Image (spheres, rainbow, N blue to C red):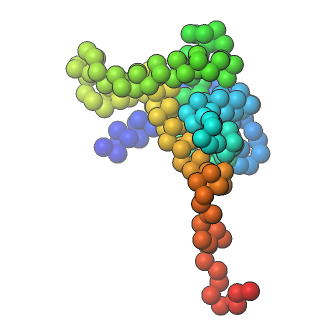
Amino acid sequence: MAALEAFDAGLDLRLFRDEHASERASGKGAWFSPAERRIAEALAARVLPSDSNGPGAQEAGVAAALDRILGAASPERRALYSRGLQDLDRRARRGFGRGFAELPEAEQKRLLEDIDRESGRRFQGPITRRLPRRLTILYSRWRSPAVDFFLTFIDDVFEVFYTSPTAWTWLGYDGPPMPLGYLDPTRPRI
């Protein structure tokens, strides 16, 4: 089983060519290229839009927080994001003639609905009847990186949003009781 997981991780990285590697932010704590940052911001705004009821991903700075998180993430996580953002942008260009960040909201929504439908059908069809399940998973990851990325991205957006001070203020939560952790018990508190 460990050999399959190592093969799976190696396969993902070997088949992937990072188109934005030369554009990546060189500063510590940032990872997105400018193009990826625009796509991530637009995608986060579709996943968690702001409305009259409250703030969304843009107000909470979700894309910037994800950029910092990916700055310290594993190569596999970075590859997932980079592959997924590139595939999403390719799909937008193929279907609508423009990159994902430049599309109007209605077309972005339609593209994401297609990806969502694809994620539900991913393990159905004639190919899954002939191949073992693990091979089908590997094939689907290589064939459609936007699907795995999109599911992960949704979870990440919600996690970052609900741990942000913007969401805390909106929810009426005043933050953790000890944001700096436990103080040194040998020093007097003022």
Q: Is residue 47 visible?
A: yes
Q: Quadrant of residue 6?
A: top left
Q: Is 23 situated above or below 99?
A: below
Measured from the top left, where is residue 56 in percent x and y?
62, 40
Q: Residue at x 25, y 15 (%)?
A: 126
Q: Is residue 63 visible?
A: no
Q: Point out the residue furthest to the front here.
A: 52
Quadrant in which the C terminus appears: bottom right
Looking at this view, is 108 or 122 the one in front?
108
Looking at this view, is 139 or 111 the one in front?
111
Q: Is residue 4 left or right of residue 65?
A: left
Q: Residue at x 40, y 21 (%)?
A: 118
Q: Residue at x 46, y 34 (%)?
A: 151
Q: Point out the residue furthest to the right here.
A: 27
Measured from the top left, where is residue 67 in percent x and y?
67, 42
Q: Quadrant of residue 55?
A: top right
Q: Is 168 situated above or below 86?
A: below
Q: Residue at x 25, y 27 (%)?
A: 132
Query: How many numbered discs, if any?
Result: 0
Q: Is residue 26 left or right of residue 58?
A: right
Quadrant in which the N terminus appears: top left
Measured from the top left, where is residue 81 in percent x and y?
57, 34
Measured from the top left, where is residue 142 in percent x and y?
45, 24
Q: Is 121 situated above or below 182?
A: above
